[in-house]
Image (cartoon, rainbow, N blue to C red):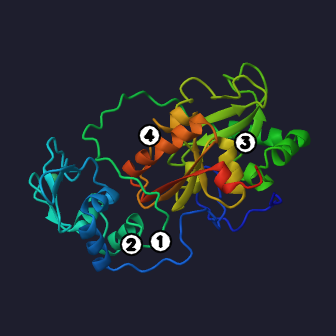
Amino acid sequence: MAPDRETPPVGTGGAKTGYTGPAYTPSIPRVTPACKKRITPEQIRDAAQADPVRAYERAGLAGIKRDGAERWQAVCPLHPDKNPSLKVFGDGGFRCFGCAAGGDLLDFYMALRQVDFARACEDLGDLLGLTGTPNTWQPRRPPSTSHARPQTPDPPLIPDTTVQAMHRALLADPARLAWLTERKHIPRWVVREASIGLGVGPCWHGRERFAIPVPTLDGNGWRDVRGYRPKGDPKILPWQKGTGRPTLYPWPWVCAETRLVWCEGEWDALNLIGRGIPAITCTCGVDGALGVELPDLHGKTFVVLGDADAAGDRLGENLPDRLYAAGAVAVSVARWEDVCHERA
Ligand SMILES: [Zn+2]
């Protein structure tokens, strides 16, 4: 167990929530190979020709079906398509008879992800396994054409003065502070940066709980304060009615990172951040994670690290597709046993 750091590394600053965000030295397993080879467009075209179906699936085309000898078809993700208008050919090329898009695998990827040629080469090198990256990539489904969501009004933000008062209450309680640092392994600098507190919320049934303030995705205020009580039932409660909807935590703190671990639970995320590993979670468990509205994840790489139980398995099976749909470049799935050898 690494000793808790009492002072954060150099802050990046600028967050409006009070976070001053440490600069990380990520050590996330299985994302970046030790020596990444440079990939040429020819290598990508060769791979697409060698196995067009696999190549287009990896690039993000879902639901590919055979449409004759050396020809396949799929619903086109480049335009709102009801029929399988997009054809993939045995030479590695494609053409959509609905929106007239066409070209090779690189053209397809650039159009799908709205990236330039160099970026497409780099991403496809990873996605096709040409860089030696472990073969854990999964296909991305075409975007949904209906964006209608039921609109519920957001509850008012929680005043920063309330959050800071609870934070001061925790700092004034050495026993509880020690429990957090020694039992939960949350370093003091993380307690401070995340404004962890102690208090009684409107919906905490009059019992004192650890307070985990949840910033809005844009970092402009506090959206919820999760009340945690070690032997409470339930263990965690929202601040008040309406604030308990799932959201990403602590998103503004880590949103500039390109490599992230998605874990289960606020304490796990803070614990990993305390070890220099950028991490996020969804505030309302695995079901929340599989329904939460995701921000733009373009260019980000994820390791999904669920708990070693049935819910964790469900997260690992279902979250990658959602992350890809939100723009993630690559997602791999790990389990605690894979990364935590102390456990055994
Ligand atoms: Zn099309």
Assign a secondary structure to mark 1: loop
Residue 288, position in %: x, y?
52, 34
Residue 3, position in %: x, y?
83, 60
In the image, is residue 253 above or below residue 307? below
The answer to whether 264 appears left or right of 330 in the picture is right
The kind of residue tagged 4 is: Glu
The kind of residue tagged 3 is: Gln
| Earlier sequence position, callout 2 versus callout 4 | 2
| Earlier sequence position, callout 3 versus callout 4 | 3
- Cα–Cα gap, marks 2 and 4: 28 Å
**In which quadrant of the rendered view does residue 49 lie?**
bottom left
Any part of residue 106 in sight: no
Assign a secondary structure to mark 2: helix
Assign a secondary structure to mark 3: helix
Mark in the foreground, 2 or 4: 2
**In which quadrant of the rendered view does residue 328 lie?**
bottom left
Q: Nearer the viewer, residue 185 or 105?
A: 105
Tag shown at residue 132: 1
The kind of residue tagged 1 is: Gly
Q: What crowding class fits label 1: few (fewer than 14 Cα within 10 Å), some (14-19), or many (20 or more)? A: some
Residue matched to label 2 = 122
Residue 167, position in %: x, y?
76, 42
**In which quadrant of the rendered view does residue 11 lie?**
bottom right
